[in-house]
Amino acid sequence: MSSRPTVLPTFIVVGAAKSGTTALYHWLNQHPEVFMSPVKEPHFFSGLQPTYSGPGDDRFNQPLVTTWDAYGRLFEGSEEFAVRGEASPSYLDLYPESIERMKEALPDVKIVILLRHPTTRAFSEYVHLVRDGRETLSFRQALEAEEDRIRRGWRRIWAHKARGRYADAVEAYISAFGRDHVGVWLYEELRDHPETTFRSICQFIGASPDYAPFFSQVNVGGLPRIPFVHRWLNRPNAWLAWIRRWLPARWRARLRQSVDHLNLGKMTIAEEDRKYLDQYYRDDIEKLRRVLPDVDFSQWLPAPVREVNRVENRRSQPARS
């Protein structure tokens, strides 16, 4: 049995999928005080053993990081960095297994959680599969088919509804590591206020909040106007290898964002599907608000509820003299 490496991450981004984890990984990777695992999603602590059978899933059936030796190699040369991390969204999705293994190996690790409104997260995941030419069903048909798909061994990326129920996972992480070691931010904050949100995350993980990366959008959703361009950008090839070798990360991010914005058109969720999912997630969001009373979920609430909350908050404020 391999021995545990001496250099391991000091923080881990555990999810959620389609909630800004890829963008955050790339931003942190630009920070001079932060070392990020060269493999963004090692999935080591969730114990994934991929044998997926869904459309296009076969390219993910590759060996993952499953041993301490392999995991330790991800952090070779990082000894001089006081802040080291990785980002694997499966750790939130498969939280019982991940927490058990993580707590034993890294009892003092900082946990970073990004959450996105579950309805828009689910639709974004669906668009991702449509964009890649893997999904042929409508959004509602895909929601209705997901339980059967997962039962037949398709990747969890097809579980749009199930992966948006966050409350139990967040509560379990807080119970295991303590509230002061679990930082929770919303995707909507990261999208609308990237500078202040990034500074807050840096403070939490112990890196200087004064560094500002190029705040690129990564893994942008939408349908490609020119499919060949999208495929070229998302498959290994000699030109991309050359660009990665010679072009600094900040400029690569600028180039990728420009191409994505030009090539990807937007899809919008049908109103009846939005209402259906909003109702489906209502109880989980209410539990999440109880678990995280210090997090502002007002953007997730329907407009009438937001207005009631504003009125109640005004009533609770002391009168000014």
Image (cartoon, grey):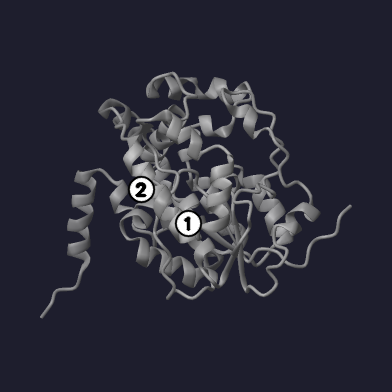
Which residue is more in the foreground, 142 or 302? 142
User: What amino acid does circle 1 point to?
Assistant: Leu
Image disc number at residue 258: 2
Residue 200, numbered circle: none
* Circle on res. 24: 1
Total numbered badges shown on the rendered structure? 2
Residue 100 appears at what percent x and percent y? 69, 52
- Residue 312, image x, y percentages: 21, 58
What is the CA distance from the residue labelled 1 to the residue labelled 2? 18 Å
For this rendering, which residue is in front, 215 or 237? 237
Res 161 seen here:
no
Name which residue type carries label 2. Answer: Ser
**Secondary structure of residue under mark 2:** helix
Q: Give the foreground label among 1 and 2.
A: 2
Using residue 101 as the reference point, say whether residue 243 is left or right of it: left
The mark that comes first in sequence, 1 or 2, is: 1
Residue displayed at 50% across by 36% down = 232
Q: Pick out the residue farthest to the left.
A: 321
Badge 1 element: helix
Q: Residue at x 89, y 52 (%)?
A: 1
